[in-house]
Image: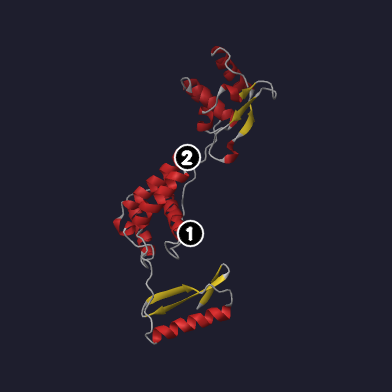
């Protein structure tokens, strides 16, 4: 059969139990069919043998030699993301039947299913298993993208993942702040009123604080999880009072 990938046609067929797959480098379907027929004929006449295919790496080889160096260099500035990929690969490496499988092995899909079953048997939550599957899915997609293999099994996330949602009431917040020591209480106040992530709050410098741009002033978030994280946030009266007291106690350092 012939099929189109991009602008050119490919053909594939089974010969003596082996898959023959070739690009015709042609955009004409008639020419592609003729090339497929010619290849079949040459095989039938014994004029050529099955063309040797480059050996596909095992999942472990690809993970160690290509995927991990890519993750380390790509996310050098995002340590948490790099650790997420590293930890995911380490979990995969603990299951020998999967990590030793070639990327083009027909049984790869079955071994992925066996890996999931093994993780479930160990009592892991659905969310934890899905995080590992996300790493595996990214790894397999890159294997196809980089030409290590033509196709890979489709990875589906498990159903039943619990999503934690909690709305903090005013009474609960008051009890928490009353019990929290400093600087935790101040940090919690800023997070609650501004919606900043903890890491964004930790990175704040006095030059990011402006006292006059709005009713109570603003803070500039300069670093965050995404490119859109850089933004200006208005301060509430409570946050302004808290920050201004700390600013004055610090000797009024550089003002925004």
Q: Secondary structure at mark 2?
A: loop
Is label 1 in contact with label 2 (beta carbons under 8 Å)? no
Q: Image check: 178 left or right of 60? A: right
Residue 187 percent location from the top left of the image: 52, 25
Name the residue carrying label 2: 78
Q: CA distance from mark 1 to mark 2?
A: 23 Å
**Residue 189 visible in this rendered orientation of the protein:** yes
Q: Residue at x 47, y 83 (%)?
A: 38
Residue 112 percent location from the top left of the image: 37, 59
In the depicted structure, whether residue 160 falls above or below residue 175: below
**Residue 158 visible in this rendered orientation of the protein:** no
Question: Quarter holding the C terminus?
Answer: top right
Q: Residues within 10 Å of mark 2 (few under 14, many from 20)?
A: few
Q: Secondary structure at mark 1?
A: helix
In the depicted structure, whether residue 103 falls above or below residue 131: below
Q: Quadrant of residue 136?
A: bottom left
Q: Residue at x 55, y 34 (%)?
A: 223
Residue 115 percent location from the top left of the image: 35, 57
Residue 34 percent location from the top left of the image: 52, 83
Q: Residue furthest front?
A: 47
Relative depth, front residue between 23 and 180: 23
Name the residue carrying label 1: 145
């Amino acid at each position: 059969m012939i099929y189109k990938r991009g602008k050119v046609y490919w053909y594939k067929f089974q010969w003596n139990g082996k898959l023959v797959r070739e690009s015709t480098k042609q955009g004409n379907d008639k020419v592609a069919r003729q090339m497929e027929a010619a290849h079949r004929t040459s095989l039938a006449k014994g004029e050529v043998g099955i063309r040797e295919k480059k050996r596909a790496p095992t999942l472990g080889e690809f993970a160690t030699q290509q995927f991990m160096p890519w993750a380390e260099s790509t996310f050098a500035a995002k340590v948490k993301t790099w650790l997420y990929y590293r930890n995911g690969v380490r979990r995969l490496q603990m299951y020998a039947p999967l990590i030793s499988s070639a990327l083009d092995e027909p049984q790869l899909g079955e071994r992925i299913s066996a890996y999931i079953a093994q993780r479930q048997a160990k009592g892991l939550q659905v969310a934890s298993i899905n995080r590992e599957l996300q790493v595996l899915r990214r790894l397999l997609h890159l294997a196809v993208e980089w030409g290590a293999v033509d196709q890979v099994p489709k990875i589906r996330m498990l159903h039943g993942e619990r999503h934690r949602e909690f709305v903090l009431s005013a009474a609960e917040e008051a009890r928490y702040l009353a019990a929290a020591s400093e600087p935790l209480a101040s940090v919690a106040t800023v997070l609650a009123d501004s919606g900043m992530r903890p890491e964004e709050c930790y990175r704040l410098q006095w030059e990011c604080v402006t006292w006059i741009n709005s009713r109570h002033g603003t803070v500039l978030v300069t670093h965050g999880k995404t490119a859109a994280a850089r933004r200006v946030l208005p301060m509430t009266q409570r946050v302004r009072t808290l920050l201004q007291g700390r600013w004055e106690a610090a000797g009024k350092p550089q003002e925004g």
